Amino acid sequence: MQLPLPGTEPAARTHPQRPEPAPPLLLALGVLVTVASLIPLGYVVWSVADVGLAEARDYLFRPRIGELLWNTSRLLVGGVALSVVLGVGGAWLIERTDVPGRGWWHGLMCAPLAVPAFVNGYGWVSMTHAVQSYGGAVLVVSLSYFPFVYLPTVAALRRLDPSLEEVSAALGQRPFATFRRVVLPTISPAVLGGALLVGLHLLAEYGALQLLNYPTLTTAILQQYGTSFNGPAASLLALVLVVFCLALLAVELLLRGRGRRARVGSGAARTAEPHRLGPWRLPAAGGLAALVVLALGVPLLNLARWLLHGSSTRWDLPDLTSAIATSVGLAVLAGLVATAAATPVAWLSVRHRGGLTTTLERATYTASAMPGIVVALALVTVSIRAVPGLYQTVPLLVIGYVILFLPRAVVSLRPTMELAPPVLDDVARSLGCGRAGVGVRVTAPLIAPGLAAGFALVSLAVSTELTATLLLAPTGTDTLSTEFWSKASSVAYGAAAPYALALVVLSVPATWLLSRVTVGAR
Amino acid sequence: MKRVPALLALSLATTLLATGCGDDSDALVIYNAQHEELMVDVAKAFTDETGIDVELRNGKDLEMSAQLVAEGDASPADVFLTENSPAMAQVENAGLFTELPQEAVAPIPAMYRPRSGLWTGFVARATALVYNTDQVSEDELPDSILDLADPEWNGRISFSPTGADFQAIVAAVLDLEGEEKTRAWLEGIKANGTVYDGNNVVLESVNSGESEVGIIYHYYWYRDQAESGDVSDHSALYFLGHQDPGAFVSVSGAGILASSDHRAEAEKFVSYLTSTAGQQVLADSYALEYPLNPAVQLDPPVKPFAELDPPQVNVSDLDGKAVVDLMTEVGFL
């Protein structure tokens, strides 16, 4: 049973049940962004059009594709499930119990976001080959991605009025029953949003899975491009990936339900009285410590080993600085543009919910499920014919990044928008504030944490992106990521290590921003 | 909120600065799928000698060939360099190359360039077996790469079938042994072996004892020895020789795009690449790939090119399409 939050019901009732029609300008912006993000899907459909139906069937209905589908599905299920367990479990322990060192854990639980998944993969494989298996793949990707669940869960727990839990406890429910029957239903939208993000990352993950020797649809697509004469086959696989993505979106939409969650006032979001763990205090802290060691210790230790051990390690400062400047510049630029582009899409889908706006929002996710090379080839094909002046320039590269990572911004914006009560707009307008004034003075401050989180998430993704960068960047552009791969794939691990280290260090500010803004939304 | 425009301007400025926008558009643009460090050395030596500026765009073989095909006549590229020949063949089949000058191809033996004269090999990598020295002794190793399909090797071998490297080897087997034997061989090693993604991963798996024998190119092992020996100290290389398909030598190609606006400079570059001077730069680099101009040799400990005794296969006879079809049929792709 879902317990209504205090303040939720009145807010929902005073607002008309039918959403008001979307302003034309906003709708136009939303449509523009969506059309741009559908370019890759259009390209894929266009390039498989040459393949006959019978040929496509022969290609798709064979054991190898079955194996890839099975691998992709079970990785999705296992990876999302373990990320949810780690993320929600960690968040509950840190927010709601008297586990020792409560103040320290939060930063450490966010920190894995600063370590790119492929660096994590390298660390694990160099330690044990046992991770080159289904279980190993699930473990390593979950250790990289569980903070996506942890962060929104912590935020939701902090917003949750502890009086609900106290009432439940007063009625004789044990802590776990309270968690299951009271807490879980109220934080489930946050958990679902995080799980969706993990799922999208897993669909597109390449670097870590290649190292873990775990073939999925995405690694197979990259391998198809690694074999000449097989463009249409790769496009067919990309279409299958899009179907996966749509299924994921549909599941999330179904589970999320149609309830409104806005509330007026912050209720009594005082600090909850922590549950006493008793004899479980130390084991709980030990569990968190183990998680940190597995998620952070292993990759960082391996990096240190490369730095000290590799004969090709050298600190080529001019190259390193220029790669840092390029990576940071591109990450910031793409982060800002993607967040701006996501705003109308997310706003339409929250405030003007309807078939059209939901479709617009969901359509922007399709490109993010495809590997970067598919998106990049689509933009190469379109831009060199339609706008040759843009080809291999920074603007086109940024457009590529925005198309790839738009959903990360949308996912971050949605929750804050859902929590901004529409009734506040009405109040502001009744007090004589214009539409623009409402946007700047009422809405923007309310959704600012979402904007910042979206920016940080996109920036993190851009800084580790490889294949689209290789195809779309201006000639002569070296980013930390392209330099790392160029050196690592020619067995010069020592030379690659400084670039990986720089990536980790540079990701710290974005991770810090995420750890602050996501939970700061009280 | 007010800081956003400033942040935007700053990031735009650094990005434009760092990506070198508004660079000299007169430079020779090279799409380089060879190892970056290697070509940076060569490009620098070329610029020093001729005064012609070179811009390298780095990537991987078949991603770059896919990009060139997508770009078509509008490509900004002047020269294309690869690690293996299938990517060259793909661009050649799309009709995007123009004929090379005699000066550029003359130093390279005819076997290592296509009969069309539309591109040329410039360095080569040799197929080799790497074996774990704690688990296998050299005299247990097979006489031919085809023997790895025998049941006695079940569960003992590893290789990386998804890369361009391995496909070049399969192309050689196909040319030398025919379709039936190649299919049987592929099915045999598929049943026997562990599949990894990347020759470096194969090397690592053999060194750590995950598998006893792996199929790789020679330089992965030599380079790791030069680096730290981290993933090669428990292994050794074994060259099959005696013109076995497993002694195949795969060539890295260089070609000039027909759409190039810098034809003369591009011809100078490819000629330099195959000349004694250019080949010496390649030989002196860390790459440890074999120069194809017979006037230049690699230093020891790398096994001399003259002792490899590879099978006689002309690059024009390697049928990439048939290889991909076969490997798809067997279920590698």
Image: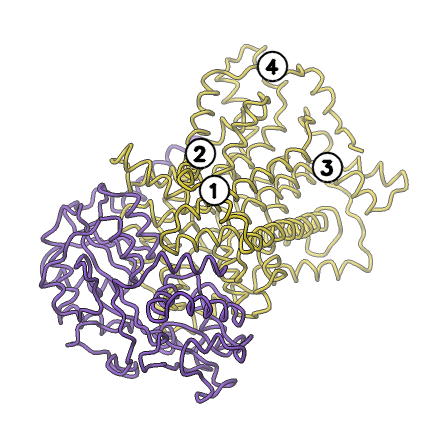
Q: Which residue is mark 3?
A: A270
- Tell me the subunit letter for badge 4: A
Query: How far, Cα to Cα, is label 2 from label 4?
Result: 33 Å
Query: How far, Cα to Cα, is label 1 from label 2?
Result: 15 Å
The shade of chain A is: yellow
**Label whose residue precedes the other's in the sequence (4 or 3):** 3
Q: Quadrant of residue B165?
A: bottom left
Q: Residues within 10 Å of mark 3 (few under 14, many from 20)?
A: some
**Label whose residue precedes the other's in the sequence (3 or 1):** 3
Please state which of residues B196 and B169 is positioned toward the viewer in this rendering: B169
Residue A1 at x, y = what percent? 80, 33
Callout 1 amino acid: Val
Is A232 situated left or right of A422 in this image?
left
- Tell me, yes or no, if residue B224 can be seen here: yes
* Up/down of A283 relative to B302, above or below: above
**Label whose residue precedes the other's in the sequence (1 or 2):** 2
Callout 2 amino acid: Ser
Query: How far, Cα to Cα, is label 3 from label 1?
Result: 32 Å
Which of the numbered marks, if any, corresponds to residue A458? 1
The shade of chain B is: purple
Colour logic? by chain
Q: Which residue is mark 4?
A: A426
- Tell me the subunit letter for badge 2: A
Q: Residue at x 49, y 17 (%)?
A: A437
Q: Could you tell me how many numbered marks the image carries? A: 4
Q: Secondary structure at mark 2?
A: helix
Q: Are marks 4 and 3 on the same chain?
A: yes
* Up/down of A130 relative to A461, above or below: below
- Tell me the subunit letter for badge 1: A
Please state which of residues A36 and A330 is positioned toward the viewer in this rendering: A36
Q: Quadrant of residue A331?
A: top left
